[in-house]
Amino acid sequence: MEYKNETIAIEGSWNLASWEWKFESIALIRKTFEAMKNERKLMANKCPGCGRVYFLPKPYCLCLSIPDEWVEIKDTATVTTYTFTGAWAYEGIADDEVSGTPQIFAGVVFDGSDTKTVTMLEGIEPEKVHVGMRVKLKWPEEVAGGLTDLAHCVPLEE
Amino acid sequence: MAKNEVAVVGVGLSKHVSKRRDVNIAELVWEAVSACYEDAGLKPKDVDAFATGNMPAFEGVNLPEEWGAGHWGAYNKPLLRITTGGTTGGSVAHGGYYLVGSGLFDTVMCIAFEKQSDGNSTMGLNTVALADAAAQLQLGVDPGFIASFGGGAVGVAVYQASSYMKSSGCTTHHLDKVSALCRNNAALNPYSHLKQPGLTPEEVAKTTLLQYPIRFGHVCPATDGACAMLFTTGEKARKLTDKPAYVLSCASASDEAALVGISGSGTTNVDPCEQESCKIAAARAYEIAGIKDPRNEIDLAEPYSPFAHQLLMFYERLLLCDEGEAPSILDSGSMNLDGELPVCPSGGVISTNAIGASAMERVAECALQIMGKCGERQVKKDVHKAVAHGWGGAVNLNVVAVLSDTPRR
Amino acid sequence: MDKEVAIIAYAQLPYEADNNMSREVMVLKATRAAIEAAGLKREDLDTVITANNDYNDGRTISNMRLVEPAGSWHKNESKVEMDGTFGVLYALTRILSGDHDIALVVGESQASVYGGILPGIMMLDPTFDRQRWLLNEVSAAALQASAYMAAAGVSAEQIAAVAAKNLDNAALNPFALRSLKGADAKKVLASRPLYSPITELMTAPRCDGACAVVMASAKAAAKVEKPVWIKGVGFSHDSYVTERSLDSMGSLKLAADACYRQAGIEDPASQIDLAEVHECFAHEELMAYEALGFCEPLQGGVFFDSGATRLDGKLPVNASGGALGANAEYATGLARIIEAAMQIRGDAGRHQVKGVKTAVAHGQTGICAQENIVYVLGGE
Ligand SMILES: [Zn+2]
């Protein structure tokens, strides 16, 4: 008897559409978004157990307490990690790879909070970005009350 | 102080390629398992318990050992399924260490595998974050917008790489060198996937840039493959082989997910290159192993590095040098097969990544190097102590094992 | 194993159809309650094992989001993708190895998230059984029930009476999801028919829930009041559902034999005071009596009819109501360990059985109880 040298493939997938997850974070984050829209404030939640401040707010803490105090944090921040898209001028890169405007993504920690938010940096050349650099949230003209309001930061001149 | 000394007496690997269409999951695993029985000179009847794991979203089979383990010799035997994402293989090996070390079992077969070509790898990876993306949809956020922040094709690794480069002085040239080193080692390993003999850093530098600073040549392939290891007591091991590899210690540590917290909340893991949990796990593992000076006592390292920068970053986080020193150590040639502290002689994860199996293959390579079974890729120096590492989750779990040619005292 | 590893504290959340909280907050509540019950702090934990399933949780690497809620941040953490009873086994080996002193094990799932039978269907042989859509966890259990009934001469009424016993017991358990005070076989048989001979009240109702136990080495348990010692453990993997005889629980028998050897139990029927069995379906409890050695093979029905396993019998089984009272998958077996420990400590409240010194707890994973694990627990 001869076998084919390939097994027969049968389609099958994990249909995740029928899973319905539950979240406390949605209500918390909505509250922060509302404060951004109505008062132009960044509201974070603070853990009573260890004092960590979460932005965006988080329903539970590393120390097993529930962060339940709302505190205002500043819109200035420090870069803790970054990357940029597309090609850029760093050593060894060929010219033909440089195309379009690179977008710089950065993880920043807003002053007064202990957590990272991912945002885009504007008004700076990619090679000048560094971990530890100071930035400031660029509030949109009209605050929509959503994550897009937090999409851009600019270098902070100090 | 484990009740039993724990030793590795056999290692088996399947053929590793991108698509194994000639076998199903159970058959692929059997390749590794049968090779392992043969390597150790044992039969399924000699095995007291099994530990197994994979990352089940990749194949779309829930608890695949329910269907397959009967074919691996586990019928009517104790079996423990351990799964921790990218670290799964390492976690399964740790399971073997504890099952034997506890004194409850003498001989344990550990099996880790992934058959990525059976499923959809992108789908498999998406399921990691789909629940959180669903929450963000609830907040009215465009999923494309979120994806753009995620770091595109290479995800959190790009953030990690640029942070690491900034803090260590590692350049893109070092990344190219890491890839060349690993792929050349892989060319000597019959069980590796991407073999590129003679690959130069200059050639790596010409591959497509995915996202700064990571190029196509700095990234692991998707592999089908399986790995099996037989753990037994020191006493039994010495009867089976002249040169067993002893497992001195295993330790793990977990961190908060690095890129975004749950469903968009903040995360205190603010810099994905810090890898505090790796340092914690390594320090714990060395302490249990009785290693006071890892820099001088460790002879070989297999850090889990699907991305080039991670080989250097984890070399540092495994406390094998000061932070920021790894790039110059790479330049010195110390990490080469004939160097002072060879790194990833197997070719590493950057050359072969059968997800669930990868972290076990690190432990397996350390064992094989200690046992002197590595053929062409056997490192020049005598290997007395080696460290095997695994990394996974959303940059949040590190597992470390220390192996040796002499038992723990 | 004599006084080497103890269960020093535990916590269960009330089992609910939809507990209206995220998986993470649910786990945090169980974790915190267990740590507090142990009189410990998060910092005291050496190792944390979570027991859950990616397909149930709808998340790949589902332990990743439990790092904070399970208290495992910067801890030696791992995940067992099996029932929590197997998580306890892993924690036990970690403590016995000498590397760890205090372990936390958490089991959890939320049926309100994963809905019904899909995770079970994904367990089937993908090349054949899954394609036919004939087998699922319930239809496979129905085949198991029929095979057992034919072999042991057990009637549907007897199986229904087992369900009635457990549902009646569950009325005394404040955590139970479902109970039926004064239930009888007739009521059970009259409930919605699923796959013959199984009716709805014979199945363990999937629900939301989490529970946690804290375990400690002898050294760490020295100052603990009323430690519950693990005296023996055994577990075994059976072959795939279509490849084995379904009329008995072979792997449970092997597991029990290994466990009893370790615990020095020679005559389980007289040496065991109480058992908590993980019966996903009522007939599995009868099969478990035999495999656990409470009666001779094929005598499960006769043994049940003797009344021995009722709350006031000589070997009460599932005084808590068992899995028929609540089935938060991956936590269900762990809850059996907790219930057995509560009985030994005398903390079981309204369903407390008098004089429980030695108890058996059983857990299972897989279709038709493919993987089984048995513990013998005892007090001072
Ligand atoms: Zn806190």
Image (cartoon, helix red, strand yellow):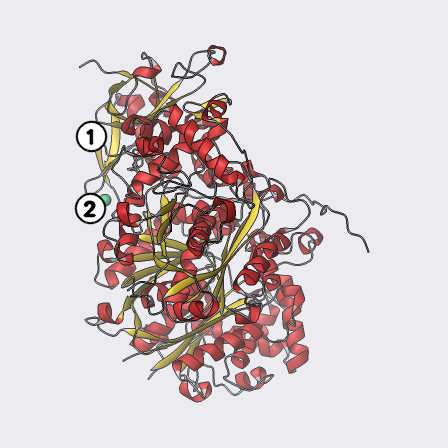
User: In terms of image quadrants, where is residue B291?
Assistant: bottom left
Q: Is residue B323 above or below residue A38?
A: below
Q: Is residue C193 visible?
A: no
Label 2 beta carbon within 8 A of ligand 1: yes
Which chain hosts label 1? A
Q: Which mark is residue A49?
A: 2
Q: What type is the residue that disc 2 sits on?
A: Gly
Left or right of C120 on screen, residue B145: left
Which chain hosts label 2? A
| Ligand 1 picture quarter | top left
Q: What type is the residue that disc 1 sits on?
A: Gly
Left or right of A52 on screen, residue C336: right
Q: Who's the residue at 44% across and 74% down the image?
A: C318
| Residue lying furthest right | A1
Q: Is residue C292 above or below residue A40?
A: below
Instruction: Write down the residue under mark 1.
Output: A112
Considering the numbered disc 2 on the image, is that residue within a helix, a strand or a loop? loop
| Residue nearest the viewer, comparing B73 with B348 | B348
Left or right of C301 on screen, residue C84: left
Q: Quadrant of the N terminus of chain C?
A: bottom left
| Distance from Cα at disc 2 to Cα at disc 1 | 17 Å
User: In terms of image quadrants, where is residue B164?
Assistant: top left
Q: Quadrant of the C terminus of chain C?
A: bottom left
Considering the numbered disc 1 on the image, is that residue within a helix, a strand or a loop? loop
Question: Measured from the top left, where is residue B12 in percent x and y?
Answer: 54, 55
Question: Measured from the top left, where is residue B343 in percent x and y?
Answer: 39, 41
Q: Who's the residue at 57% across and 68% down the image?
A: B43
